[in-house]
Image: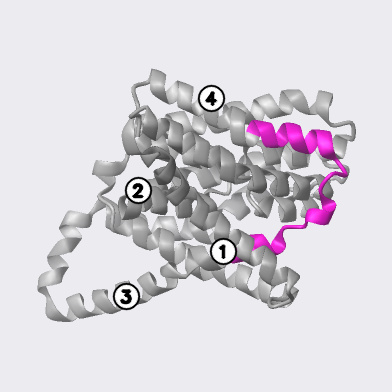
Amino acid sequence: MEHIGFAINSVVPSFFIITLGIVLKKMKVITEEFIKLTSNFVFLVCIPCLVFRSISKSDFYQIFSTLELVLLLSSIIVVFFISWALSAAVVKERNARGAFIQGSFRSNFAIIGLAVMGQAFGEAGLRHGSILLAFALPAYNMLSIVALTWFSAEKQEGTLKKVAYEIIRNPLIIAVACAMPFALFQRELSGLAVIPVASNVVKIFDDAISQLGAIALPLSLVSIGATLRFQRAGKSLWPALVSSFIKVIAAPALIIAAALFLGIRGEALGILFILTACPTAVASFAMAQSMGSDRELAAEIIVFTTVTAVFTLSAGIAILAATGLI
């Protein structure tokens, strides 16, 4: 029971806030305009602040693991190609295959992942997860654009430039780039604390970043709930179910098996599991829509993975905790 309680406490609070977003939208307490403005504010300001603070407070050399990074990126690529191989058999319409592939591998790591990691492993988990996020984001963006472009019914111009532009201008990538020097040279920069003026400036800046970062996850989770569209569910049932199975069951099982084989245990194993077991990123809907893919299928995958992830994440964390692996 102790392990089940740990799993529930790690996962359910985040999904409770998502449910709150659904209810508030149904009650018309929050509007489409509020969702749009909040989502932009969170994406452009709050989450970058959270990621910046988590990474800048980290000792990069202590947290970073080449083995974890290689395993993470390898698992993303493997799931991407498995989904690609299955897409022709599962999805009849060619232009919908990009949405199917993207929904199968692209995790909502920056919001739900960090929220669950924070609940499960505290501040240390956030720092560890943010370091991996720095490398996962470009991979997600690049592979999503490749899949959506390849199967798009519309001709896509300047794909390579688009990939590079999307990566460079992503606020989370910018936050990571700004935070990395602090993580790399944390010991050297700590000497600034003895200089009174510098110390005060750093404290003011840190407090502001901390407060903005603190509201990132609650606001993001409410927005996710408010953007879910259950009336779309069922129109492309089979492809959405297969994609959801890959996303929240097959992909996590794959990375857990590989991690155990490589001797990864503890917090690192839990974070790798959470990263891959998260539901599909909400941003995949907008990307599918903008690149001529099937937005209805993209929306269904988001709904199905979000609903099922609360159970698969809880079950996975409970099993890993009960077996002493985390």
Looking at the picture, how far across and down is residue 141, in whole percent?
A: 61, 46
Instruction: Describe residue 40's horizontal placement relative to residue 267 as left or right.
Output: right
Discs 4, 2 touching: Cβ within 8 Å: no
Residue 218 at least partly seen: yes
Spatial CA span between label 2 and label 3 = 22 Å
Tag in front: 2 or 1? 2
Looking at the picture, how far across and down is residue 133, in whole percent?
A: 46, 47
Discs 2, 1 touching: Cβ within 8 Å: no
* Magenta stretch in the rendered image: 222-246
Q: Which residue is mark 4?
A: 254
Specify which label sits upstream in the sequence, 4 or 2.
2
Spatial CA span between label 2 and label 1 = 20 Å
Foreground residue among 210 and 77: 210
Magenta-span inclusion, residue 10: no
Q: At 28% across and 53% down in the image, what residue appears? A: 58
Please, what is the three-letter code of the amino acid marked with disc 4?
Answer: Leu
